[in-house]
Image (cartoon, grey):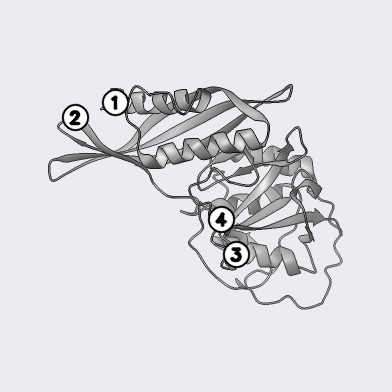
Amino acid sequence: MKSTLAKVMEAKAQLLVGNIRSAPSIKLPEQDLKFIQRKKELMDKRFAEIVKCNTKGQIIGKNEVDGKMHLNYLVHYQYLIRQNKNLYIEEHCEERKAVFTLNKLISDEEVPKETDTQYETMERDTPEEDTREFKYNRLDAVQYAERWWNDYNPKYKKFTDNCTNFISQCLHAGGAPMYGYPNRSKGWWMQNNNWSYSWSVANSLRWYLAGSKRGLQAKEMSSPKELLLGDIICYDFEGDGRFNHNTIVVAKDFEGYPLVNAQTQNSRMRYWSYYDSTAYTPNIKYKFFHITNN
């Protein structure tokens, strides 16, 4: 079974680097072929290419049901990307479930983990200003995002949908002050094994950044190119007004577009648009927030 999964990962790597019309050594699921197609379309749009792809798998769970063996495993992808004369490494991890019958692979699919399923609303802040000075240290925020994008800081609670918790940690590492405890529907904070909705829920953080008048504050920008390192992008994949993912800008590509880190599906130096995500839809909407000093 391990050797079969290794062949699947190798086949994906070959197609990502080579021609998608070439025949892989093993038949891939339609979902994987769609991902590869989108990834290559995105590279073409950016005048970039994947020159090398490394994959590494790890089995994290095994369960036999009705004579079928169910394996949950993690795959870590590393892409060496060339854009113009620049080279950089993009990474992402995904959880997958494979099902075998008599050691024959009958299905192999990604376990969807790209969106935040939590949904809470925030109260509007009062107009009272916080008089504390706050200067956002973008380097510290980015360094934290680089250190923990594929790991979990034991100082903080880990959530099943961890994307916004991770972004809040990055912002706090950059010096953003907490306030509002113990009111979960106001402010932005994590304290005493409790937290505000804005700290951990994607949609709540989006609205907090749009309206905060104290502590952590932001200015909405019209274009991703206007963002600086340490700024935040919010994603509404379905375009229904409910934002369900957040990322932090950690670099810019050759054309000046953001590359982002995120969790839930842990990613590093990923192109900002998420066109290659399984959660992407043509109705996707974005909010671009520039963190400001006060």
Q: Amino acid at mark 4?
A: Pro
Q: Earlier in the sequence, mark 2 or mark 1?
A: 1
Which residue is painted at 57% across and 48% down in the image?
155
* Mark 4, other Cα within 10 Å: few <14 / some 14–19 / many ≥20: few
**What amino acid type is highlighted by mark number 2?**
Asn
Q: Residue at x 66, y 77 (%)?
A: 123
Residue position marked by numbered label 1 in the rendering: 4
Contact (Cβ within 8 Å) of mark 2 with mark 1? yes
* Kind of residue sitting beneath label 3: Asn
- Is 196 situated left or right of 128 in this image? left
Marks 4 and 2 sit apart, C-alpha to C-alpha, by 39 Å
Residue 123 is left or right of residue 4, and the answer is right
| Above or below, 215 relative to 30 | below
- Give the residue drawn at x 55%, y 34%: 40
Image height check: is 103 above or below 232? above
Return the residue at label 4.
282
The answer to which of 180 and 103 lies nearer the viewer is 103
**First along the sequence among labels 4 and 2:** 2
Q: Is residue 188 visible?
A: no
Question: Cα distance, mark 2 to mark 1?
Answer: 9 Å
Residue occupied by mark 3: 203
**Foreground pick, 156 / 70:** 70
Q: Is residue 117 visible?
A: yes
Give the left or right position of residue 95, taking residue 190 as reference. Answer: left
Q: Secondary structure at mark 2?
A: loop
Q: Nearer the viewer, residue 25 or 141?
A: 25
